[in-house]
Amino acid sequence: MTTAPRTVLIIEDEPDIVRGLRDTLEFEGYEVLDTRRAADGVRLAREHGPSLVILDLMLPDGNGFSVCQQIRGFDNRVPIIMLTARALESDKVRGFEVGADDYVTKPFSVAELLARIRAVFRRLARERPVTEPLRLGPCQIDLTKQTLTRGRKTEPLTFYEVELLRLLNERRGEPVGRDEILEKVWGLQANPTNRTVDNFIVKLRKKIEDDQRIPRHILTVYGTGYKLVP
């Protein structure tokens, strides 16, 4: 599989959206691949190794949940932004559960989506020092390899799961506010309705905590945000 830096794969069946995104992204200097079909999207992701995937939830031959899950089967690192006309919280949670990193509801502002894309590439471009594995209870987390090992089982972590853990680990033992997490990890302005941070905390607790109802390592600091405790 070849790697094409700064390449965005758009999997979307609405021609006007594809045209608008392609024009904007190419003007910004990104390479763009696009398809309207789920099967072709998975194939292009496998063959070209894009740096970012923009994925529609509803496609003619499938749905974005399935496509996301298939891509995660061979690439856990590529950031995936899901587009959908459905704003149900359950859809967002399911999207995060199958490996989506961000969620944009149609109709959306191209400027807002572009801001999110720029934030992704800024974080990808940053040099990351090789760090010692992070030990949280029975879990060993390799932030460089993006893996979590618990007992004999090793599973991949997605781009934003790692970035969220990295930030909390840098401030280990200190409360980090939701607004700060949203801005530093996702590059987004705070929004009272944005549950992205909370949804990712839920995902990580499922993987790390013995009992996510009584977390010992990723703690809620009420009125502020979260903190990491080894």
Image (cartoon, grey):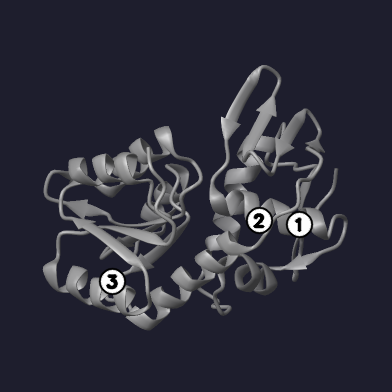
Q: Which residue is mark 3?
A: 106
Mark 3 Cα within 10 Å, few/some/many (few <14, many 20+)? few
Q: Quadrant of residue 123?
A: bottom right
Tell me the SS state at disc 2.
Answer: helix
What's the mark number on residue 168?
1
* Amino acid type at image mark 2: Leu
Residue at (43%, 55%) from the top-left corner?
51
Position of 189 with respect to 1 (left or right) is right
Q: Are marks 3 and 2 in contact (CB under 8 Å)?
A: no
Q: Which residue is mark 2?
A: 164
> Toward the viewer: 28 or 11?
28
First reached walking from the N terminus: tag 3 or tag 2: 3
* Amino acid type at image mark 1: Leu
In the figure, 51 relative to 117: above or below?
Answer: above
Quarter occupied by the N terminus: top left
Residue 31 at what x, y percent from top left?
A: 32, 64
- Tell me the distance, in whole angstroms, between the alpha carbons under discs 3 and 1: 31 Å
Residue 27 at what x, y percent from top left?
A: 32, 80
Q: Are marks 3 and 1 in contact (CB under 8 Å)?
A: no
Tell me the SS state at disc 3.
Answer: loop
Residue at (75%, 52%) from the top-left corner?
129
